[in-house]
Amino acid sequence: MDFYSNLPAASSSIASSIFPTLFEVLSADEIDELLTPSVRYIVANLVARNPNKLTIRFSNWFDEWFVLAAKLTLESYYLKTWDATFIEVFYGLKRINASDAVLLRTLQSNPPVEIPMRLTRFQRRAVLCEKVLAPYVALKLDLLHSKLLARSLLQHPPAQEMGQRVRESLRTLYLRFYPLLKKLLFVLNLAVKLYFLSGRTGSTSLLDLILNIQYTRLSKYDYSRNDRSSTAPGQAVRSRPQRLNRSALLFLCRASFSKIKNLLKLSVSQMLPAFIFLLRVFQWWSSQDLSGEIQRRLNNIDKDIPPPPGRFEKNTEGTCRICNGPIRNPAVIGTGYVFCYPCILDYLPQHEGKCPVTGSQLLGCQYDKDSGHWSIKGVRKLLL
């Protein structure tokens, strides 16, 4: 987080000194997208361990209390204080209001200079809609689309009333144009990201480009502005209070709390991506049940091939047990014995589909009462 904010301003490209790389922005977006399913997985496991009416309702309303309420509160706080989302702060990123071209050119020519280009209230609300409300609405629309698509696959009688026909027409239009709208938005956002690679803009989405919201890196001024423990210019930092009165105790508590807060922020910034990655790996591992499969294979790797179920007579002479001659055009049946293909096809219907050696009934041989003949299946030719 602090690494990108302390990068040198001098660069061969002016834009590259104030705009982050696309990899940084995509990494922040990827972690942001993985945060919700990771928390959902944890909640689902906790509810599965202690299922009751309250916990089940808590899990069913996950989208409302976490995706909508909790993230809306968290992102509102970070956008108000940092001009960035929760994940973007830990990646050392922020958003600026690039509507004033003069201020933007000044910042590009003098990156170390602190220029007030904070987001407006309308821009913060637009970012909240993009990061919180839009994913929530898209999730509900995807669920509705899947339900309507499953319903459309079933045959229903044609609607007779006018209202029903109108609703059916709206459902048809929704099923047809909703996927096209998602693809269109994806292509437009992809085009904006490709335009971002040219270095002419710091916007990575269509909404950011329309509202003149661009990415840049957090600077030391942003950290000093949000660090409540920083002293004012010209104020001397005392090594210790003169006496242990109430003000001194409050000063020590605030200083200790500030150090703990900074330590927690640094720990979260380093551990959050790794935690989400390990959680996703564990989820994939447990869903595929690979651990049990690998363990079963390791346990059976040195074992011999198990013998056939029952007594098995080896035919070392290579003769057919039916005609007692050399096996020609070999064929194998369900019991594992090999015969001449014409011999076994002629033998099975005459002996009720039983093996010539073991006398057991073959599963592929069944008597058809309608035709009065035996249906012979399960005889496989061998290629030697």
Image: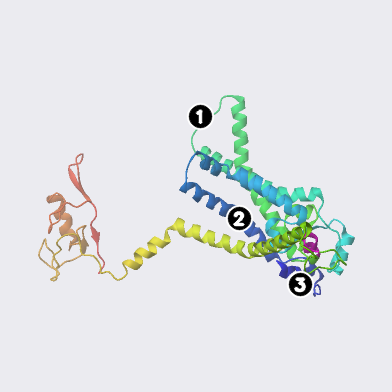
Q: Residue at x 15, y 56 (%)?
A: 355
Indicate the colouring scheme: rainbow
- Decide which of tag 3 and tag 2 comes sooner along the chain: 3
- Image: 126 above or below 28: above
- Image: 164 above or below 363: above
Query: Magenta part of the protein: which range?
Result: 221-230
Q: Is residue 181 visible?
A: no
For the residue marked with disc 1, what is the amino acid?
Pro
Q: Residue at x 87, y 59 (%)?
A: 101
Q: Which mark is residue 166?
A: none
Return the residue at label 1.
157
Return the residue at label 2.
35
Identity of the residue furthest to the left in this view: 324
- The front one of 89 and 130 is 89
Q: Secondary structure at mark 1?
A: loop
Query: Is the residue marked by circle 2 packed among few (<14), some (14-19), or many (20+) residues within 10 Å?
Result: some
Q: Nearer the viewer, mark 1 or mark 2?
A: 2
Q: Residue at x 17, y 59 (%)?
A: 342
Return the residue at label 3.
7
- In the image: residue 181, left or right of residue 13: left
Q: CA distance from mark 1 to mark 2?
A: 44 Å
For the residue marked with disc 3, what is the amino acid?
Leu
Q: Secondary structure at mark 2?
A: helix
Query: Is the residue marked by circle 3 packed among few (<14), some (14-19), or many (20+) residues within 10 Å?
Result: few
Task: Determine the image quadrant of residue 253.
Answer: bottom right
For the residue marked with disc 2, what is the amino acid?
Leu
- Decide which of tag 3 and tag 1 comes sooner along the chain: 3
Residue 161 position, x and y percent, is 58, 24
Residue 118 position, x and y percent, is 82, 56
- Decide which of tag 1 and tag 2 comes sooner along the chain: 2
Split into 4 quadrants, where in the image is the C terminus? bottom left
